[in-house]
Image: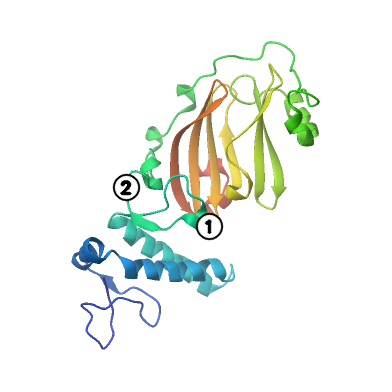
Amino acid sequence: MIAFRQERPSSLWFGTSRAGTIISETGKVIAADKEVYQPVRLISQWREQNSACRGGSGDSDETLSACDRREALGSKLKAVGWCFGREGEYGYQMDWHACDASSQEASAAIVSGVSDAARPKPGDFPTRDRLTRKTVLPDFKGRDRDFNSFRTRIREGMRQGPNFAGHYSVIQIGCGAGCSFVIVADNKTGRPTNFPRGGEGNMYLDLDYHLDSRLLAAQWLDYDVGRCFLEYFDFDREAWKPLSKTDIGTTEVCYKPIRDNLR
């Protein structure tokens, strides 16, 4: 429950002041709202501010203020055990619910603010093999014909030599403003594969990886919820094994290079 400086009984009043700012909030009323009625009024306010944030002009003070209020309301919902979105849902399907095992937050092994010591380290995921002979290019007329549309970019990337996990080339290809996808090609066999993140669902995709490690970090923006995520993967025996997924902040965080956010 939110209390405001207005001339009406405030013990059961919930809303925004004329300035659209939250004056105060009591944990006792929040608990009652959650356990008995669900925080429907708080969720309603979040949705209102989310619409104003996403629908307004990106550089206006009103839009930025709406985004700030949305973040404040979201933090209050999370503080009383509510989560936004379930694992595997698309952005348009996500909504607030009492946190459970299917919540997106439950799948994150790393949370915002965790020290670097708790993050996966490249040295803990050493390469299993290295390229010891000349690069083998894909067979775009046969086995690898599904990648034929990108043959020039793939060939150029592979001819520069491996840059990931001993004998693989990570090749990122643009698909519009802020949009890209990634192909990972094996320089030993010539076989290209797709990385599981990219396209319009994972905007501003940025990667961090090393030649001597199987660990790959991916940073991307979910436009539908206005949040920036950081994921870690282990590329073990040509299979992408998710290790963790972390909400690292608002849209602006994803405008920074991943290496800046990993410092």
Image height of 239 relative to 223, above or below: above
Left or right of 236 on screen, residue 108: left
Q: Residue at x 80, y 33 (%)?
A: 152
Number of numbered discs: 2
Q: Classify residue 209 by image quadrant.
A: top right
Q: Which residue is mark 2?
A: 100
- Residue 175 as seen in the image, left or right of residue 14: right
The x, y position of residue 21, in whole percent, is 37, 75
Q: Secondary structure at mark 2?
A: loop
Quadrant including the N terminus? bottom left
Place of residue 51 in the rendered image (x, y in percent of width and height, measured from the top left): 50, 69
* Mark 2 closeness class: few <14, some 14–19, many ≥20 residues within 10 Å: few
* Residue under label 1: 224
Q: Residue 17, which numbered label?
A: none
Question: In this rendering, does residue 93 appear at all?
Answer: yes
The crowd level at tag 1 (other Cα within 10 Å; few <14, some 14-19, many 20+) is some
Query: Residue most toward the bottom?
Result: 7
- Helix, strand or loop under label 1: loop
Q: Amino acid at mark 1?
A: Asp
Return the x and y of residue 195 as percentages of the image width and height: 60, 34
- Residue 226 in view of the camera: no
